[in-house]
Amino acid sequence: MTQRFTFPGTSLRVNRMGYGAMQLAGPHVFGPPKDEDEARAVLQEAVALGIDHIDTSDFYGPHHTNRLIREALFPYAEGLVLVTKIGAWRDESGAWHLRRDADFLRQSVEDNLQRLGLDQMQIVNLRMGGPEDDIETPMRAMRQMQEEGLIGHIGVSTVTEDQLARAREIAPVVCVQNHYNLVHRKDDAMIDALAEDGIAYVPYFPLGGCSPLQSGVLAQVAADLGTSAQKVALAWLLDRSPNILVIPGTSRRTHLRENIDAAKLRFTPSQSKQLYGLAKGQG
Ligand SMILES: NC(=O)c1ccc[n+]([C@@H]2O[C@H](COP(=O)([O-])OP(=O)(O)OC[C@H]3O[C@@H](n4cnc5c(N)ncnc54)[C@H](OP(=O)(O)O)[C@@H]3O)[C@@H](O)[C@H]2O)c1
C-alpha cells in the first residue's frame, strides 16, 4: 500500500491510495448497478486490500452507492474513513441539479448518515458549481453542522483559489476535491499551496473519468514499464505531491487490483520528465 496521510487537525489517517465509489451506481451514475454482487465484492475487496478512504455521495444512484457501501461494509472496519459530498441532487430523469441552501445541505447530510448507518460523517465535501458561486453562505451552514456534530470535518469541491480562501476564513478545510489528472493540470499552483498547509488534494477523474486519458507519452511510458496507462496515471498522481490522495473509481475487482498495484510503480528520471511535461505540450 501507499504511504499514509493525516487530514490536518484530525485523527483521520488514511492510505494515499483510496477508492471512489461513484462507478458503483448504474450507467451515468443513475440507478442500481447491473451487477450488485460485484459492486459489493469490489467494496469488500478494497477494504481487504488496505483501502481505508472511500469517497461517496448520496446523489450517486441516487442512494444506491451508499446503500451498497452499507450492505457490503457495515459494521465498518476501525479506521475506515467515509467521505461524502453534498450540494446536488438528481431528478427522476437523472438530470443533475445544484443546490446549497442550509436546509438542503442539512437534509443531504442526514440522508447520508441514515443510508450509511452513521451518527456523524467524518468528512463532508461541499460541492460548488462554478467560479461565480458564493461559497460563504453554504460554508456557514457547514460550520453550523460541524458545531452540532453532524459533520466531523469539512472539505470543498470544484472550487477556485478564491473560493477556497473564502471558505477557509469561515472554517478549517481538510481536503479539496477538484478535477485534476496528468493532462488536466489547472490546479498545479493550488496543489503546491495546499501541500504547504498539509491539506489533502483529492483529484476527481484521475483516469479521465468517462473520457479515458489519451496521450502518446503516457502510452509510451506505460509500454516501457510493461504496464497499463491507468497505472502510470495513478502512480504519477502519487508522485506529484505528498498531499495528493487518489480515489480512482471502478465497478470491477480486476481494475481495483490493478489500480491499487499502481502504488508500486516507480519512474526513471527521464520518464518523470516526460510525464511532468505533458501538460506543457511537450508530449
Ligand atoms: N467532487 C466531484 O464533483 C466528483 C466528480 C466526479 C467524481 N468524483 C469522485 O472521484 C472518483 C473518481 O472519479 P471517476 O470514477 O469519475 O473517474 P476515474 O477514476 O478517472 O475513471 C473511472 C473510469 O475508469 C475506468 N477504470 C478504472 N480503473 C481502470 C483500469 N484499471 N483500467 C481501465 N479502466 C479503468 C472505470 O471503468 P470500470 O468501472 O469498468 O473499471 C471508469 O469508467 C469517483 O468515483 C467519485 O467518487 C467526484
Image (tube, rainbow, N blue to C red):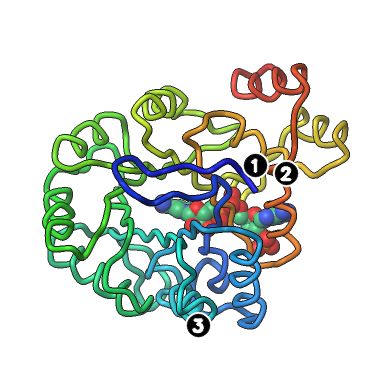
- Label number found at residue 248: none
Task: Please say if 101 is above or below 273.
Answer: below
The residue lying at 65 percent from left, 75 percent from top is 41
* Residues under numbered marks 2 and 1 in contact, where contact means CB atoms less than 8 Å apart: yes
Task: Please say if 56 is above or below 33.
Answer: above
**Mark 2 → mark 3, Cα distance in angstroms:** 29 Å
The amino acid type found where label 2 is placed reads Lys
Q: Residues within 10 Å of mark 3 (few under 14, many from 20)?
A: some
As helix, strand or loop, the secondary structure at mark 2 comes to: helix
As helix, strand or loop, the secondary structure at mark 3 comes to: helix
The residue lying at 51 percent from left, 76 percent from top is 73
Report if the beta carbon of the residue with label 2 is closer than 8 angstroms to ligand 1: yes
Residue that carries the numbered disc 2 in the rendered image = 231
The amino acid type found where label 1 is placed reads Leu
The residue lying at 49 percent from left, 74 percent from top is 69
Q: Nearer the viewer, mark 2 or mark 3?
A: 3
Q: Nearer the viewer, mark 1 or mark 3?
A: 3
In-image side of 237 versus 11 (left or right) = right
Q: Is residue 169 visible?
A: yes
As helix, strand or loop, the secondary structure at mark 1 comes to: helix
Residue that carries the numbered disc 3 in the rendered image = 71
Residue that carries the numbered disc 1 in the rendered image = 234
* Residues under numbered marks 2 and 3 in contact, where contact means CB atoms less than 8 Å apart: no
